[in-house]
């Protein structure tokens, strides 16, 4: 590690959203960006950051003096750092952008908690040290709009625990991480940012993360979904990564509060996505069937009679 000026500590910089945030920090700010990197040693961390900058920006050289690799891991106590390195980082951090998280829908709850909940707790601990050592102006935590879980009504920015259940371990772990932030973050300039489903760039469509909608869309393009359990009018709230990254930076200067980064009334419907996907893939649109009827009567039949590719796609849809 090198650098003496105060700057931004970014976690999750090697991920989809975090990488876009890193690009904006380097292009729009003159202060250092301390990027938390999982690595075997400091040399490995530097190499990983250099490769990341080359991938995102074409070259690492113009940014080498401001993008500083910090070896650390949110799944380890005190981020896996010794006291000297922790103090060094705390004295130089005046803003934290915590983007690191597991976004898997299939990971078990214990592993999700190890990353999303315990990792957040460790960032809160570090934020407290930053506040005591060098002063902390903002601590932005990227959560998800799906902390709402199965709640059927309106879910506002100030809502959190409304008795909801959760569809998967990801939603539950992010909910628990927000609870922890509220319980342990008193006195810190905490801010919660809740994006919905983050997809590729709004202009180019570029994404390195082909998950969530991309798997079903790929299967749809191959004709693996003859029927979809849904309602045509149901909203599918997706937001492009550039919108979310821009919002993270714009809002990070306003510590305090919770913000939904969603499409809201501009969200696409299931029917609109089906029509767009059908036209793009030159495939006939699948039938849209009420979810209850589909699961009881149709899904089991398709699993028994479909091709292996179709069965794999259908099993993924069970998550």
Image (spheres, rainbow, N blue to C red):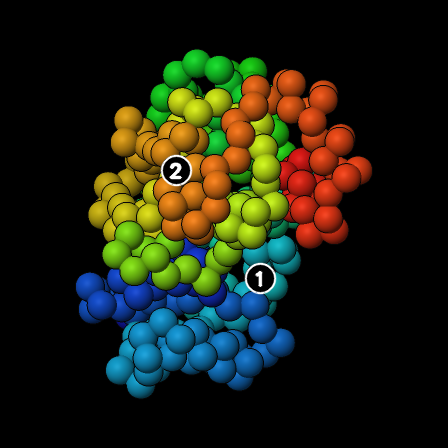
Q: Secondary structure at mark 2?
A: helix
The residue under the point 30% across, 66% down is: 23
Q: Residues within 10 Å of mark 1 (few under 14, many from 20)?
A: many
Compute the Cα span from label 1 to label 2: 43 Å
Q: Quadrant of the C terminus?
A: top right
Q: Secondary structure at mark 1?
A: loop
Which label belongs to residue 275?
A: 2
Residue nearest the observer in this picture, 211 or 97: 211
Q: Position of residue 22 (x, y in %)?
A: 34, 63
Q: Residues within 10 Å of mark 2 (few under 14, many from 20)?
A: some
Residue nearest the observer in this picture, 139 or 210: 210
The residue under the point 43% across, 50% down is: 282
The residue under the point 22% across, 47% down is: 250
As displayed, is residue 62 above or below residue 38?
below
**Residue 150 seen in the current view:** yes
Describe residue 53's horizontal placement relative to residue 48 as left or right: left
Residue nearest the observer in this picture, 214 or 293: 293
The reply to whether discs 1 and 2 touch (Cβ–Cβ < 8 Å) is no
> Does label 1 or label 2 sit earlier along the sequence?
1
Q: Quadrant of the N terminus?
A: bottom left
Q: Position of residue 143 (x, y in %)?
A: 45, 40
Residue nearest the observer in this picture, 297 or 176: 297
The number of discs equals 2
Residue 60 quadrant: bottom left
Q: Position of residue 226 (x, y in %)?
A: 59, 37
Describe residue 179's horizontal placement relative to residue 189 as left or right: right
The residue to which callout 1 is attached is: 73
Which label belongs to residue 58?
A: none
């Amino acid at each position: 590690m090198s650098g003496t000026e105060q700057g931004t500590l970014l976690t999750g910089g090697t991920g989809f959203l975090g990488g876009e945030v890193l690009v904006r920090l380097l292009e729009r700010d003159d202060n250092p960006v301390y990027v938390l990197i999982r690595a075997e040693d400091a040399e490995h961390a530097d190499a990983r950051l250099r490769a990341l900058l080359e991938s995102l920006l074409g070259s690492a050289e113009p940014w080498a003096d401001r993008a500083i690799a910090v070896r650390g891991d949110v799944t380890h106590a005190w981020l896996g750092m010794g006291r000297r390195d922790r103090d060094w980082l705390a004295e130089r951090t005046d803003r934290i952008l915590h983007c690191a998280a597991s976004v898997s829908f299939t990971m078990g709850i214990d592993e999700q908690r190890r990353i999303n909940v315990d990792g957040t707790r460790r960032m809160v601990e570090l934020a407290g040290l930053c506040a005591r050592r060098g002063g902390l102006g903002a601590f932005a935590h990227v959560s998800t709009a799906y902390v709402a879980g199965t709640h059927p009504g309106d879910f506002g920015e100030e809502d959190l625990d409304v008795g909801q259940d959760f569809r998967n371990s990801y939603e539950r772990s992010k909910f628990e991480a927000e609870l922890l932030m509220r319980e342990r973050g008193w006195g810190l300039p905490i801010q919660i940012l809740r994006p919905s489903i983050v997809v590729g760039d709004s202009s180019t469509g570029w994404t390195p993360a082909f998950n969530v909608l991309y798997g079903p869309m790929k299967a749809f393009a191959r004709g693996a979904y003859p029927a979809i359990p849904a309602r045509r009018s149901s909203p599918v709230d997706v937001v492009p990564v550039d919108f979310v990254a821009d919002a993270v930076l714009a809002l990070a200067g306003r510590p305090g509060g919770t913000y939904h980064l969603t499409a809201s009334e501009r969200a696409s419907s299931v029917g609109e996505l089906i029509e767009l996907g059908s036209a793009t893939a030159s495939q006939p649109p699948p039938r849209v069937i009420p979810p209850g009827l589909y699961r009881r009567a149709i899904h089991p039949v398709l699993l028994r009679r479909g091709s292996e590719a179709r069965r794999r796609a259908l099993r993924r849809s069970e998550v």
